[in-house]
Each structure stands twice: as C-alpha cells, then as structure tokens.
Image: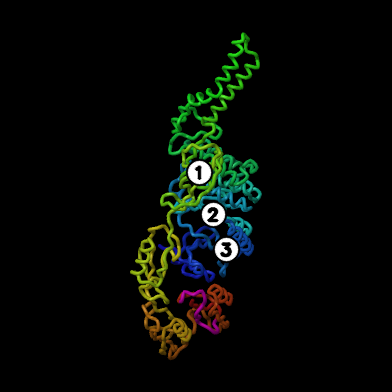
Amino acid sequence: MDTTVADPLVGRLLDGRYRVESRIARGGMAAVYLALDIRLDRTVALKVMHRSLAEDPDFVRRFIGEAKSVASLSHPNVVHVFDQGTDGDHVYLSMEYVPGRTLRDVLRERKRLPAREALEIMIPVLAALGAAHQAGMVHRDVKPENVLLTDDGRVKVVDFGLARAIEAGNQTRTGVMIGTIAYMSPEQVTAGVADARSDVYAAGVMLFELLTGHQPYQGDNPMSVAYRHVHDRVPAPSSLAGDIPQLLDTLVLSATDRDQNRRPTDATALLVAAVDAHRMLPRDMGPQRPPTGAPAPGPAAAHQMGAPPANPTLIHSRTEMLTAPAVRAAVESPRRRGFRPHWFIIVLVVLMIAAIGGTGWWFSEGRYTKVPDLIGLNTTVAKLEAEKQGFVVKIGTPEHDKQVAENKVLRTDPESGKEVIAQSTITLIPSAGPVKIAVPNVVNLSEADARAKISEASLTAGTISRVPSDTVQRGLVLRTNPQVGTKVREGSRVQLVLSAGQLMPDVSEMQCDQAEAFLRQKGYNPTIVQQTDNAQPGTIIAQDPAARAEVTAGQGVQLTCSKGPDTGFHWPWENPDNVQPGQALVAIPDVRFKNVADATQELRAAGFKVRVRKIAGAGSVVAENPLGQAPAGTRITIWH
C-alpha cells in the first residue's frame, strides 16, 4: 500500500515554495519528502521534523542556527543544505536530493564488506567529516543511516548539526537514543560533550561494523550499551572475522580508544591513516605492496612485480671508466717506486670506492621511481597517496567518461608505471562522469512533439502518466520527471506527465454563495436552483456536471441549493447528535483566505472540531461552513 496517500503533507505547497510530491522515508525524528522547489524549478529533499520537536522553541532556535552553519559547508561528500524554514507547526530543511540508498541498507543486504571496499566507503566519509572539523563543526551522530551511497558510486554524509539541535532541545527519547548510543563515545555518555574526536570514535565503530557485520556492543537496553562504551574496550575486528588484516585492527582500535587524547585528533588525521592502510592492502588478491619505509626489492623481486631489474654491469662499467685509472695510479705508483702503500693511499682508495657507489646510485633506481597506479581512486585520496610517495601533485581539468565515476582519477600525466625522477610533478586528470544533458522544456507540447524534442536532446522519452490540470489543455505535457532543466546522463529516460484536463470540483455541502463565487473565480458559469431538502439551508446538495467529471473552461454548471425542510425542527449543523437544546452558541471565526494550518488552529482554539477538504490545491482556505454561531464542539468544514 502507498503510505503517502494518508500523509497530509503530500500534495501540499509548503511555505509557499516547496510542492511535496511523495514521502521517501520516516524516522524517529523526522520524515523526508521528495519535493519541487517551484521558485528555482529543482527537485529537493525536504526533511520535516516531527511535531514533538517543532513544538520545542529551544530546539527550533538551535535548529535554525545549526542549519545556517551547515549550509556554509561545501564539500563533494556532504549533502548540501539549501534552505531552512517553518510553515505553521512544520519545521523543515531543504536539502540536495541524492537518489540512492543508505549505508544501513547496504549492510542489511550484504551483512559485511571486504576490507578494501569498507575503506573505500570510509575514506570519503572521513574526508567529509574532516572538512567539517576544519570548519569548527562536529557531526555528533555518525552512523550508517547518515551515509548515503548514490547510484553512480558517490558517498555523501547527511544530518550535520541535527544531533546538537536535538540535544539542546532536551528531546532525548528512547527511540532516538537506541539509534545513536551504539556509536556514542565514552565522553558523550559520561559528560554529554562532543568534539572532533567523538566523531572519530563513531567512525571507528562504523568501520568495525562494516568489517564484521556487527556493532561492537549489544545490550537489552541503551543504558547497558552505554555502560560498555565507558568501561569496555572495542574488540579487534579480526576477533570476529579472521580474514580481516591486522592493519585494520590497528586502525579501528586507534579510533575507538576510550581515552580521547589517544585517538587521532580529528577525522583528517584518521583519513591519512585510512589512506595509508588502503595503500598497503593487496589489490585483487595480487602481491601486496611493500609498506612505507620497506627496503627496495632486489632484481628478482622487482622483476616479479613487473619492474625491469637494474643492470649492475652497466652501472659499474660506467663508474669504472671514471675512477679505475685514478685508483690504479694511486696504488701501483708507489710499488713501481719500491714503496708500500701508506695510510693516505688507503684513504684515497676508500674515497674512490665511495665515489663508485654514489655514481652507481645516480644511474640506478635510487634516483628514479615509478608513477603509482592511481586510476579509479577518489581524487583527494589519490593526491594524498602520491604526495606521501614524494610526488608534487597538480589537479588537471576534469574530462567526461561513461565508466569512471565523477571525482575519481581517470588518468595521470605521466601515465601509471612510467619511470620518472623522484619528486617529479604528476598531474591527476579527474573524471567529470558521463556527459550530463539538461532536460529540455517540453511543457505545453503535445506528446508527439515532446518525444521528438527529448530525442533531439539525446535523451529517451519514458512512460506516460496523466493528472488533472486547470491550466494546461488536455493531452499536453504538464511536467516531466526529472524536472525541466535537471541534468541527467546522456540517453536517460524522461517521464512525461500529460494533462488530463479540468475535472469538476466537488462543492457539495459548501454554502451556496461561497460555491458560486469559487466556481466563477475558477472560470465556470454557475447557475443556482432552489430545492426543498432536509439538508442545512443554504448549502449545495447537488451539482451538474458531477464532481470529478471532465469539464472545460467557461462551461455552465448547475448547482442545487437546499431551502431546508417544509416543516419540522432542523439543526443547522452537520452533527446534531452532539448538540443539546439550550446549549450556548459560540461565534464561529471566519477563517476564509487564511493559511490552512492557522485556520485549523484558530477554529480548534475557539472550541470547534475541524474537517479539511481539498478542492483547489491552494494553501489558503477558500470556503467555510457553517458561519455565524454554533455550539462548542460543532464540526466546521473548511475547503482549500
């Protein structure tokens, strides 16, 4: 069943700007919706806080402040925050829409990840956290649910600052704590404080879970898990899975040390260690690269690793031409004179031998090194790796490629494996990903013309759907999905949404004068006939054409208005069973043309029940029934 059908926000224009199209997810603190920013014509993700949080003024104040700080954080691995606002009792964030799934979804499906793949997810996460730490920000809620994996392989971190706003609002409920306590550092548990090293601890716990498929501590309740964070030491991942390399044990145990002063100082420091660990892991079960500082392989080992062995004969032949005559002259000359070599001759020989060794180094591998294989790595990671090996690194102009994801190394100049002088400059050419094409504007075109225009743009027209529209003629394109102007891969499918034309609004039970005014404002030509009926006098009891029938602009509409019964007592309200004779009447607030949320709140504050009916899709009330006076508890119907 579609859960969005019963969601009151779906179909609503939030804050006069964001048209909510569907609900993507719902969690303990907020619900996330897919929405269209009609001002900028772009698809966004709206995170709308639950009402229990929005009713806390301290939370709202801190939430707004944190949102402003996060919006200033620009990094390719951080989900961008565009806007923040409130609409009645709705507090929301407008964020970059990232199609894909969470790291939690991946763990549910795959249980655990290989060491190399786990690091390749953690490295961009740490890069995002490191950028935040450099800007003086702390995430406070690092966990797989807050890591998004896009369809094209990018990694994005979300919800910076949200945990701090919730803590400030004193909104620590059981459901929230269970989701956070598994990654909470000891100092957060004992003192309620967090800094960059707290994020490092949570990242270490998350890496543990990626490698083993389990969180380090399990418990029947949050307090038992919190106790273990404070008093126990996170076990080595290899104690749960024997195929995990020891260097990853070291990485996890360093990040999750109970003493925050013994952890890496921030995520950037942990990132450097993670890149180093990634470099030392074997590629595709091939030979493991030698660790940093290991002695250079000899000729046989170099040959096995694909490097040409040094030629010692050539090296020594070059040095002999330079030094041998001088050595022989120094040694043999005294003998011809009948003298034994003195100490100064021995010293000279030693110096000559040193010269031979130095000259040999100059012509051997010591002066030269190979360009490392950086293809396919994240550009930031590749730059750190190359700099660690002594290269000067430049980032070149990105180039489009269908196979290599955006912001990963497409090629290097010089190319991988080429021998160059040590400390040379190499240029990394990042991939710009596949060619992106803006969805053309086909609104108000026929289906055939829209398909042709989409095909001309090297895109493919997809399936068709039809929805009612008061403004676009039946059969013409109302909108596209993705929206017009959105950049998509060459050859991508663009869904067409066609207009089903105008449908007759349902004005039943509306007061006759309000119904007539509303229909005239919508472009219809209504006429009213009176009829005796037991319904409330002055309300619509029938309409022709019927509700939701296909109509055209300017069409005539006949409305049948109740005159009330001929005889007998009649209550003028919709729920007479709840009204007692002699009950005091209360003035009904006129909430027409007010915001729906404000109107609802005002009527309830006056003691009335409220029923909301959608008729125009607008955010303000267009009709209200009854008006005047009624006993407290009467149900008032409003249309918007």
Relative depth, front residue between 431 and 530 = 431
Q: Which residues are magenta?
A: 616-630
Identify which amino acid the numbered label 3 is placed on: Ser
Of label 3 and label 1, which has the lower sequence position? Answer: 3
Mark 3 vs mark 1: give the one in front.
1
Quadrant where the N terminus is found in the figure: bottom left
Q: How is the image coloured?
A: rainbow
| SS for callout 1 | helix
Q: CA distance from mark 3 to mark 1?
A: 38 Å
Residue 425 in which image quadrant: top right
| SS for callout 3 | helix
Residue 384 rendering spot, x and y as whole percentages: 55, 43
List the residue tagged with mark 2: 78
Identify which amino acid the numbered label 2 is placed on: Val
Q: CA distance from mark 3 to mark 2?
A: 27 Å
Mark 3 vs mark 2: give the one in front.
2
Of label 3 and label 2, which has the lower sequence position? Answer: 3
Image height of 100 relative to 548, above or below: above
Are the two marked residues, 3 and 2, in contact with CB atoms closer than 8 angstroms?
no
